[in-house]
Image (cartoon, rainbow, N blue to C red):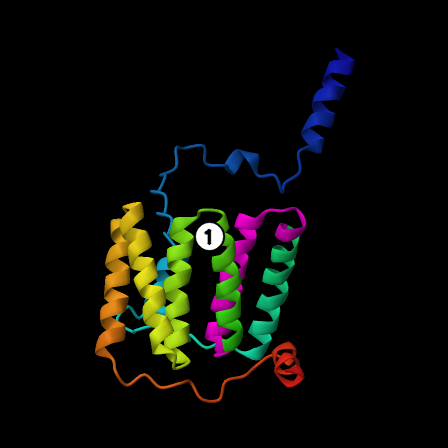
């Protein structure tokens, strides 16, 4: 009994005045509605700040390439062509020569372009690759026309037309007819001036 009374006294003594537990309000408090989260769309805000211009025309890609682009393209295509020739992949090498010729056309080096079209055409004939041969003849004719050789240009297109007709290639035949008409109606073909030749081509010309 004595110990029980002592425990009660100690418990009452430990309740400090700062607790104020007897003054707490245990009534049910009012709960307010949760604040709605804001929706943030970064892309929508960015588009509103910097609108995309849709009616602006893009500048056309230039057909003439720089010397740096030419040299880089030469290395890549020539390496592939040498690989094809080493492993006797002549069909693939023919297409690489055509790519190299197109590269020279863009660089306005028509002499080299003509030479590589001839090499590609020689291989494509041996491989009986009629689509590629017809394409080479068309490109070769346009190069010859730019060089001023209209007679040979027309001969190449005539050969391409006969080949397309015999092979039953209607689309190629239509394209050749368009090029022939274009060649015949434009009588003011002039040789390209300021042709640039490679060092190898210049050395060959001097040696003759």
Q: Quadrant of residue 10?
A: top right
Q: Which residue is mark 1?
A: 125
**Secondary-structure class at tag 1:** helix
Let me know if residue 196 appears in the view. Answer: yes
Task: Residue 25: give x, y in percent of width and height.
Answer: 45, 36
Instruction: From the viewer's side, name the closer residue of 181 and 60.
Output: 181
Report the span colored magenta.
84-110
Task: Residue 111: give x, y in percent of width and height.
Answer: 51, 76
* Residue 94 is one of the magenta-drawn residues: yes
Q: Residue at x 49, y 64 (%)?
A: 118
Which residue is most to the front? 208
Instruction: From the viewer's side, name the closer residue of 61 and 34.
Output: 61
Q: Quadrant of the C terminus?
A: bottom right
Q: Residue at x 64, y 79 (%)?
A: 204
Which residue is most to the top? 1
Instruction: From the viewer's side, name the closer residue of 19 and 119.
Output: 119
Q: Residue at x 39, y 66 (%)?
A: 139
Q: Indicate whether 39 appears above or below 199.
A: above
Task: Residue 20: give x, y in percent of width and height.
Answer: 57, 39
Let me know if residue 52 appears in the view. Answer: no
Q: Quadrant of residue 34?
A: top left
Task: Residue 84: give x, y in percent of width and height.
Answer: 62, 51
Q: Indicate whether 172 appears above or below 188.
A: above
Q: Residue at x 34, y 67 (%)?
A: 155
As drawn, is 88 to the left or to the right of 103? right
As drawn, is 31 to the left or to the right of 175? right
């Amino acid at each position: 009994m004595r110990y029980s009374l002592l425990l009660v006294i100690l418990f009452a003594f430990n309740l400090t005045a700062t607790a104020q537990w007897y003054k707490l309000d245990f009534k049910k408090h009012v709960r307010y509605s949760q604040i709605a989260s804001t929706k943030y769309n970064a892309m929508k805000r960015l588009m509103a700040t910097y609108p995309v211009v849709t009616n602006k025309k893009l500048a056309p890609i230039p057909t003439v390439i720089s010397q740096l682009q030419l040299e880089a393209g030469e290395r890549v295509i020539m390496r592939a062509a040498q690989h094809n020739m080493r492993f006797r992949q002549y069909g693939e090498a023919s297409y690489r020569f055509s790519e190299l010729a197109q590269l020279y056309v863009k660089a306005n080096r028509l002499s080299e372009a003509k030479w590589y079209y001839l090499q590609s055409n020689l291989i494509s004939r041996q491989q009986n690759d009629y689509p590629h041969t017809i394409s080479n003849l068309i490109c070769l004719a346009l190069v010859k026309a730019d060089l001023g050789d209209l007679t040979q240009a027309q001969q190449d297109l005539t050969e391409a037309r006969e080949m397309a007709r015999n092979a039953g290639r209607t689309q190629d035949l239509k394209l050749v007819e368009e090029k022939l008409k274009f060649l015949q109606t434009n009588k003011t073909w002039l040789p390209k001036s300021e042709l640039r030749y490679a060092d190898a081509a210049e050395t060959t010309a001097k040696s003759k």
